[in-house]
């Protein structure tokens, strides 16, 4: 296996479109790094540049210690798994697994050994003589993974490999890929638009938007310490609630927003980063940091807000409660409990120490 190192890698198409604007990061030998972001953010283009399927406009790309900017794909010693299974329909599973090795002139004994090893790893032993049409979606995706696995490459590149599967199969295949990575200790780059996949699979995550890297960190650090407004809103489901307004210290610390006020802890407002903001700020609040006040449990009511219930969505072990506050909808994640009907008022308590603050003009997180 080998690490991957990108330095100021940039991709500009002939029409002037900037697909990737100066990406710099490293993937350690044996690490699984997820590239995540909305459609069109440049994550698949970045993966294709690493694979050699897209030329690099500027910057350097190393696989191991080797500069590979001008090395053709077949000589980079990488294997790529695409969104579509791309299996040969007239070939059996065994023949699909062996095809790439045969093209490279590998001897028959070694091909057989590597196909058997990959089939055993992915539990395909009983399917080797079947054609792709006789396989389920999950089995086809395992064959696509196996085709990459038999080559024993230095780096695995996976481009949204689970997006064609239903929810149940995605979960099982996600577990399968995680297990495979732990077993092989392989270097993997995994592209997905699904932040749940990124959070559960990636040891680190690269968050992209509009061709630019927004933040690189571990899953929980991205969730708890987002660098900016985009990361805070993209990572987490349901998404973080945002309250836009102006800070006020008199008569008490609060955020004045759309005819309502949100109480804030004075100690946080006194920090230098917040004190220096002259314009609007945005306060972020995770859905699970809101709780429904029970009767007689309001206390002094300082860190509470009154909202109107919009919808109640029970999903088993929790309820997604959508409310209206300061002319916008907010979402709460609460335990199962009796709740007011839509149109009724509800009082919610929030945890002031968990609030996040962002500069409304730049989107930058204010420490």
Image: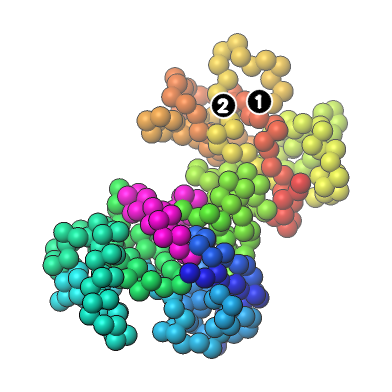
Magenta stretch in the rendered image: 171-200
Determine whether label 1 and label 2 are within 8 Å by CB.
no
- Please tell me which residue lies in front, 13 or 161: 161
Number of other residues with Cα within 10 Å of mark 1, as a class: few under 14, some 14 to 19, many 20 or more = many
Residue at x-position 43% and y-position 54%? 182
Where residue 12 sits, quadrant-wise, is: bottom right
Where residue 61 sits, quadrant-wise, is: bottom right
Q: What element carries label 1?
A: strand
Give how far across and how far down residue 312 sits, in percent: 43, 31
Name the chief secondary structure element in magenta: helix
Residue at x-position 59% and y-position 77%? 65
Q: Which of marks 1 and 2 is nearer the N terminus?
A: 2
Q: Does the magenta stretch include residue 4?
A: no
Residue at x-position 46% and y-position 49%? 200
- Please tell me which residue lies in front, 301 or 127: 127
Closest to the camera, between mark 1 and mark 2, is: 2
* In this rendering, position of residue 240 left or right of residue 302: left
Give how far across and how far down residue 148 sits, in percent: 35, 70
Give how far across and how far down residue 237 sits, in percent: 49, 44
Where residue 101 sits, quadrant-wise, is: bottom left
Number of other residues with Cα within 10 Å of mark 2, as a class: few under 14, some 14 to 19, many 20 or more = some
Residue at x-position 26% and y-position 76%? 111
Q: Distance between the residues labelled 1 and 2?
A: 9 Å
- Please tell me which residue lies in front, 281 or 59: 59
Residue that mark 1 sits on: 304
Q: Is residue 184 magenta?
A: yes
* In this rendering, position of residue 88 left or right of residue 361: left
Give how far across and how far down residue 328 sits, in percent: 58, 41
Q: Which mark is residue 291?
A: 2
Would residue 257 be seen by someone viewing this image from the given angle?
A: yes
């Amino acid at each position: 296996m080998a690490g991957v190192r990108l330095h100021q890698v940039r991709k500009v198409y002939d029409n002037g479109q900037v697909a990737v604007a100066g990406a710099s990061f490293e993937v350690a030998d044996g690490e699984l790094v997820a590239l995540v972001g909305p459609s069109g953010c440049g994550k698949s283009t970045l993966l294709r540049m690493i694979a050699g399927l897209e030329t690099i406009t500027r910057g350097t790309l190393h696989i191991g210690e080797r500069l590979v900017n001008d090395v053709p794909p077949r000589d980079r010693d990488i294997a790529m798994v695409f969104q579509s299974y791309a299996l040969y329909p007239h070939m059996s599973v065994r023949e699909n697994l062996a095809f790439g090795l045969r093209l490279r002139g590998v001897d028959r004994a070694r091909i057989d050994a590597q196909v058997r090893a990959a089939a055993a790893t992915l539990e395909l032993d009983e399917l080797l003589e079947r054609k792709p049409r006789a396989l389920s979606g999950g089995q086809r995706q395992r064959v696509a993974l196996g085709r990459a696995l038999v080559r024993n490459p230095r780096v695995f590149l996976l481009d949204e490999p689970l997006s064609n599967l239903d929810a149940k199969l995605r979960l099982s295949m996600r577990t399968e890929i995680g297990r495979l990575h732990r077993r092989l200790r392989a270097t993997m780059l995994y592209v997905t638009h699904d932040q749940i996949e990124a959070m559960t699979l990636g040891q680190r995550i690269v968050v992209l938007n509009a061709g630019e890297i927004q933040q690189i960190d571990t899953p929980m650090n991205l969730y708890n310490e987002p660098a900016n407004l985009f990361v805070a809103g993209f990572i987490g489901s349901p998404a973080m609630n945002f309250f836009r307004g102006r800070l006020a210290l008199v008569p008490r610390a609060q955020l004045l927003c759309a005819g309502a006020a949100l109480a804030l802890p004075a100690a946080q407002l006194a920090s230098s980063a917040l004190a220096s903001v002259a314009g609007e700020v945005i306060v972020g609040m995770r859905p699970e940091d809101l709780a429904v006040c029970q009767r007689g449990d309001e206390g002094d009511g300082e860190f509470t807000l009154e909202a109107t219930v919009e919808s109640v969505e029970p999903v088993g072990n929790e309820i997604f409660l959508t409310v209206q506050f300061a002319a916008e909808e907010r979402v709460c994640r609460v335990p199962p409990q009796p709740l007011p009907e839509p149109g009724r008022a509800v009082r919610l308590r929030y945890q002031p120490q968990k609030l996040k603050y962002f500069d409304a003009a730049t989107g930058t997180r204010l420490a």
